[in-house]
Amino acid sequence: MSTTTAPQKIALRDAFGAGLVELGKTNEQLVALDADVSSSCKTAAFGAAYPDRFFNCGVGEANMVDIAAGLALGGQRPVCSTFALFLVLKGAEQIRNTVCYNKLPVIIAGGYGGLSDSYDGASHQSLTDIAVMRSLPNMTVVVPGDANGVQHALEQGLEMDGPLYLRLSRNPTPVYSNTCSEPLTIGKIRRLRSGSDITIAVCGVVTNQTLEAVDILDQQGVSAELLEVHTLKPFDTETLIASVAKTGRILTVEEHNVIGGLAGAVAECTAQHHPVPMKTIGVQDCFTESGDYDELLDKYGLSTQNIVAKAKELLS
Amino acid sequence: MTFTIPTDIRRLDPQAVAAESDQIKKNAHIQYLAQENRVDVLDLLHDKGTGHWGGSSSVSEILTTLYFDGMNIRPDEPEWADRDRVVISKGHAAPMIYTVMAKRGYFPVEELDSLRQINSRLQGHPCMRKLPGVELSTGALGHGISVCTGIALASNLQKRETWTWCIVGEGCLNEGESWEGIMTAAKFKTNRFVVLVDHNKVQLDGPCDDIMPLGSLADKFRAFGFTVADHSYDGHDVNAIQESLAWAKSNDTSGPLCIIYDTHKGHGVDFMSDNYKWHGAPIGVDDYQSARPQLVETLKELEASL
């Protein structure tokens, strides 16, 4: 990963849109739904390629989730897309009572996750979606960090016997996994770096900042183990516990409220199986604001420098 | 207490009702069976001390007609891909749904005794993952129209000739999602999809006009893009229900359809009928002893036409 040339950048939403079109070629059961943001969330290309299999449901997220559920009951493989905030919260009861309770194979694709709808402000920024989705029985929760991850999660999600929440993001972001030997595999933590002094667990596009932080820590003589916990549920307890048993401490990094997301999942796991000192980086249970995406990430603690600093606090 | 199907009333063989080829006779038998189901539900709810009587009684004839004649189904093969499907969006009618399904052959009638009890397949509101034949877990109101739109879209996409029926009550139509679903079905012109309104005009907390007036439902459905039957039907008269289903089936390329049935919540018992207090109240001994003879008397009147 310490290559000198910058990796290619692709937005997760573009990878999602392209992945749907590609998968639609061979998977005739695949149908896509959107709620009047198909040009933003990139399902529009699927609609152009397969107009009979695309359903723009207008601005009614709850209804769209149930339409998707009905299509699944009728034998289709629906992917249901809109902004994560509205999909998860306006569609929450439908996702719980129809999709999850009946264990229907619906992919709930939350676009513009985290702070990535940066200029639109707090009304559009999704920082509770992981917590909500994680608490629903039968739901699998995946937060990819780059384009390859989106592609692999989509492919695997379409083979699953139940629902998947797939969190996406808006802006172009480095494809860090081009150098990984293993693809994203749902349910299995991916170790991006091996280390012995501290475990850092991360999910989503802020994996990039965390990779940079791990390099800096390395230059400063700190050996950090970086775990990409792309699957928040079901949780890969074994890999996480093996890591913290080795390092004795853990830092979590997520573009989400520190309540109920990655920090919650990690704490639930370590507290029961191998308690270790822990610190969390994420949005501190507050409403966020408009601004440039990178500036917002910095302001809410998701900067390379802050990850380095918090790791050092945990080591001191 | 153990609930057993009482033997003090004449019982039809439900399989014979389903198989009857003489339509006039069949309708009379369905009418009788629907009232028999009403007696069984009253007995069951009294015995269990829990469950919704009002909305169960209201929908008896509609459900019994659909399951025993209106739908192309195979109770011994509930996952059959070319079956017609009914989603009862008003899931609190579970006791009636279960009674009709059991008699139609989806599961043993004796299992009704487990209604709402621990480890039962007969949940307080229907659960499709526990009980094969239930097309959708319902209970939370307002889901049916959207989900059925999706089911119908899949059927249309796969060029199947199947029908999708969705039974809603006023509570469902209070939910905004229902109207989103209605707009969506209209937008995509979903064929062979029918919304059946069990219009009993009473909801949990009181008369609909006091709780949330729905105005002219037919005009609303039409304005939202549905084809609506030009008059409402008596939802307690099997012949009328059969007419309405025939109207729907003659409109199989007209996009989504709506039929409104005039019904009475708690139908069949004078002090329960149209009274919101009997939406879900337990049926105690005194009320049970007053109610049951009324249902049985009607049953005996129907017996004359068998």
Image: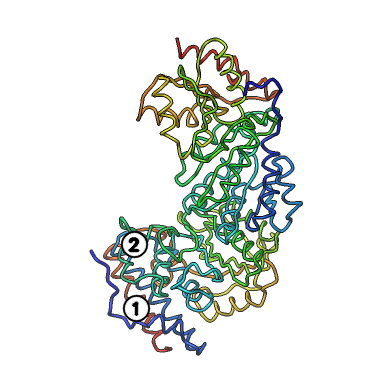
The colouring scheme, among rainbow, by chain, secondary structure or one colour, is: rainbow
Amino acid type at image mark 1: Val
Report how far apart the C-alphas of labels 2 and 1 lie in the structure: 23 Å
> Does label 1 lie on the same chain as label 2?
yes
Q: Relative to residue B51, is residue B161 depicted above or below?
A: below
Outermost right residue? A48
Residue B132 location, quadrant:
bottom left
Q: Relative to residue B253, is residue B210 depicted above or below?
A: above
For the point 68% across and 38% down, the residue is A13
Q: Which mark is residue B296?
A: 1
Of callouts 2 and 1, the N-terminal one: 2
Is A46 on the left or on the right of A97, as rendered? right
Badge 1: how crowded within 10 Å, few (<14), some, or many (20+)? some
Secondary structure beneath label 1: helix
Give the quadrant of the N terminus of chain A. Answer: top right
Q: Relative to residue B77, is residue A184 depicted above or below?
A: above
Secondary structure beneath label 2: loop
Q: Which mark is residue B83?
A: none
Q: Nearer the viewer, residue B53 or A244?
A: A244
For the point 31% across and 70% down, the residue is B110
